[in-house]
Image (cartoon, rainbow, N blue to C red):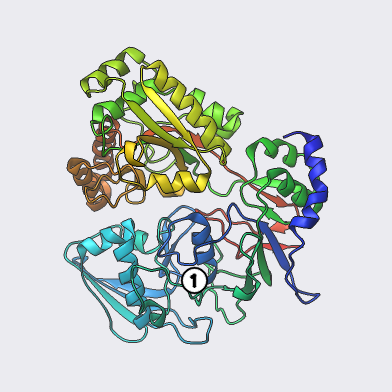
Amino acid sequence: MSIGRLIACLTLTSVVLFATVPAQADTKVLRVVPHADLTQLDPVFASIVITREYGLLIYEELFAWDSKLQPRPQMVDSWTTAPDGLTWRFTLRDGLKFHDGQAVTTTDVVPSLQRWMARDLVGAKVRAVLTSIDPVNARTLELRLDKPYPNLLFALGSAIGQIPVIMRATDLQGDPSKPITTSIGSGPFRFNAGARISGAITVFDRNSDYVPRAEPADGLSGGRLARVDRVEWRVIPDAATAAAALQNGEVDIWEQPALDLVPLLSQKPGVRIQRLTDLSNQTMVRPNSLFPPFNNPKARLALSYIVSQADVMAAGFGDEKFWKPCNAYFICGGPYGTEVGTEDFKPDLAKAKTLLAEAGYHGETLVFPSTHEIAWIGHMAEVVADEMKQAGMNVDIVWADWGTTAARQTNQNPPSAGGWNMFVTGASGPTMHHPLTNLGTNMSCDRRNFAGWPCDEHAEALRQAFLEAGEADRSAALERLHRYLAQVQPYRVLGQYDQPVALRANVTGLLTSPVIVYWNIDKN
């Protein structure tokens, strides 16, 4: 991005930011450039990140992950566990009220959790061991399990996928296959539906009736103190325009600044750059395991000897200070970031060709949908495709906008009938750091797992063994799981990158958290 183009865009920001929401003169407004427009209002229906951010502003959960991704009580005041680990009782804290003034009770909590368990992959693991969930009284509920589940609290605080927010029971009485269209939560902000302009602005107002926890904010846990009166998400698709708006002070935060502009922004007075999480994001090439050749694990394994992480990551993210090679499915630098079983993963075309021949691949066309709309995805796809061609693979990249590309990824038809063979994508470090939450290593055979739909019952048995392992056995269970995943390759890890947040120097209180949140943030 040239400085000339950046300066030229200064005059555009007034047009983009023209749509304003009337406010009192003394109202403290935090103006944010989000990474996407908000189109889906149900965080238990959609797993997209912008809907998760919205959900965390207006709803709450029983537990919440702290900055170290450990579960802490949020709506829960206290809980007890039977000695056999099969019965759990949770008591809600005082002061919980929905935005309409109605008290939050266990008659809201139980159907909310049941809906989450029916929709979310993390919730499904809880449902698999659940025998009953019932209110004891208005503030206490009881869960009974058929076997101990060490990850229960971690799951109840999940910040990935469809998150287990608590909604009003009356909002859950409609068709369970359709999203909730109301936005009445109990969190620190209220959704201002009247100020919403699709494609331009989304507004949240401070909930003056909210009673925060007494503990300091830590990640998603602790006291969710709304220190500003209003949060406004202002959609600015053009990176140069967003950068100019930040420098001018017309916006306070840019959630995901373009990495090629970060060095320039970091030198500007009044602007600073901050990491959101200690865990880097993961990138991958995801093969479709439903159809040849990638229904054979040998063809998937071949990708580890075809793709050069250094070449692909440099194409996507440029300067190496923003990225690093890593073969850990569960994130290098995380608590489960082993690379065991991947020691020989480096370009070796002879070995790759042997594996492809053993998998029965003979030069058939491979459909590779991708997009330039998200620049790093397009750049990385080009390098992956080129390296696959060098290994004798016949690759056809199908370019489209991101919406079309993402929609095609959910198509389970054969590649010749609208389906696909592989695509490049990425996911956050907090999402991928744990065998429970890593959606790409879910190899369940029900075709409800992440697009690509790998099916491997042994992999699932190893994953379940890890989830059920006690502290003393967890390391060995992790090694067995990772060694096996390295051989069956549900996806090829391409590496890790850091996506910082850009903000004005007068903005304080941005939390280290798995998802960006807007409580605790203040501006001077």
Most distant residue in the front direction = 417
Above or below, 74 relative to 386: below
Residue 239 appears at what percent x and percent y? 68, 44
Which is nearer the eye, 299 or 146?
A: 299
Quadrant in the picture for the C terminus: bottom right
Residue 75 appears at what percent x and percent y? 44, 73
Q: Is residue 368 at all visible to an observer of this figure? A: yes
Tell me the SS state at disc 1: loop
Which is nearer the eye, 214 or 279?
A: 279
Above or below, 332 relative to 230: above
Residue shown at the point (41%, 16%) measured from the top left: 390
Quadrant in the picture for the N terminus: top right
Quarter assignment of residue 286? top left
Which is nearer the eye, 271 or 512?
A: 271
Above or below, 514 relative to 228: above
Residue 162 appears at what percent x and percent y? 40, 60
Q: Is residue 82 left or right of residue 407?
A: left
Residue shown at the point (65%, 49%) measured from the top left: 237
Neighbour class for label 1 at 10 Å: few (<14), some, many (≥20)?
A: many
Q: Amino acid at mark 1?
A: Tyr
Residue shown at the point (36%, 15%) measured from the top left: 348
Q: Is residue 124 left or right of residue 370?
A: left
Quarter assignment of residue 475? top left
Which is nearer the eye, 83 or 42?
A: 42
Q: How many marks?
A: 1
List the residue tagged with mark 1: 59
Residue shown at the point (23%, 42%) measured from the top left: 455
Residue 486 appears at what percent x and percent y? 29, 31
Q: Is residue 309 at all visible to an observer of this figure? A: no
